[in-house]
Structures are given as C-alpha cells and as structure tokens.
Image: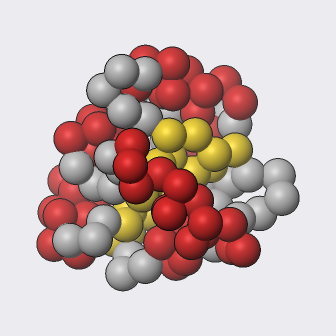
Amino acid sequence: MLREKTLAVLGAGMMGGALARGLVACAAMPPSGIRLFDTHLAKAEGLASELGPGALAVSSAQAAVEGADLILLAVKPPMVAGVLAEIAPFVLPFATATWASLGDARRAGKRILFEG
C-alpha cells in the first residue's frame, strides 16, 4: 500500500530518521518514495544516502511536500505550527499529514502506516 506513495519527512534527526529507516527496513516503502528536508541539509543528505538509492534530500520544505501523499513532521513541538503554516499552500488535498515527538512517536507511526 505504501510502496506506491511518496513520503515527505520534515526533520531528518532522531525521530524522522528512525521512522524513515523503519519504513525502508521493513520494506513498507522503497527509498525512492522518500523525500527528506532538514534545516541542516547535510543531515538530510546523510540520511538519504543511508536509506539507499532514490531517497532524495531536498533544500526546502516546499520541495519535500509538493506532490507528497504522506507528510511526516518530525520537528520539535514548538516548531510544528510554523512548519505547518509554511507548507500548507503546497500540500495536496488528499495528503495524510502527521507529526511525531518522543511522546507520541508510536501513535504517529501508526497513523502514517494505516491512513496512507
């Protein structure tokens, strides 16, 4: 089901990285379906390289979410509202968006897997 979807991961740190790695490791999604954005581009590039061929690090949140079926906000809670405001004009009407933090990562991961 996810294999045909495109996932935008906003935040390539501990949480975003763990969820992206998990999706690839369990073969739920190929690396080529994942676009990564982080304010530190080198972090997104490193994760893309780790995920495998086709994973793409992009230089803006807009580039990550345009055309994405699924959006994972893996940013610190105080940043969520600002990131949502920034990406809102570029999100597809049928896209599923969720956010993860240490407190609700399990629930957020399930929403991505089962709402997509």
1, above or below 60, in the image: above
Residue 18 placement, left or right of 67: left
x%, y% of residue 43? 17, 64
> From the image, which quarter does the N terminus lie in?
top right
> From the image, which quarter does the C terminus lie in?
top right
Is residue 34 something that shows in the picture?
no
Q: Camera-side residue: 30 or 34?
A: 34
Which residue is depicted at the point 64% across and 61% down? 68
59, above or below 30, in the image: below
Which residue is depicted at the point 50% across and 63% down? 82
Name the colour scheme. secondary structure
Residue 74 placement, left or right of 102: right
Q: Camera-side residue: 31 or 116?
A: 116
Quadrant of residue 44 within the rendered picture: bottom left
Which residue is depicted at the point 40% across and 25% down? 105
x%, y% of residue 53? 32, 62
The residue lying furthest to the right in this view is 93
Is residue 105 something that shows in the picture?
yes
Quadrant of residue 90 within the rendered picture: bottom right
Residue 5 placement, left or right of 102: right
x%, y% of residue 98? 58, 40
x%, y% of residue 87? 60, 69
Which residue is depicted at the point 77% across and 63% down? 92
Q: How many marks?
A: 0
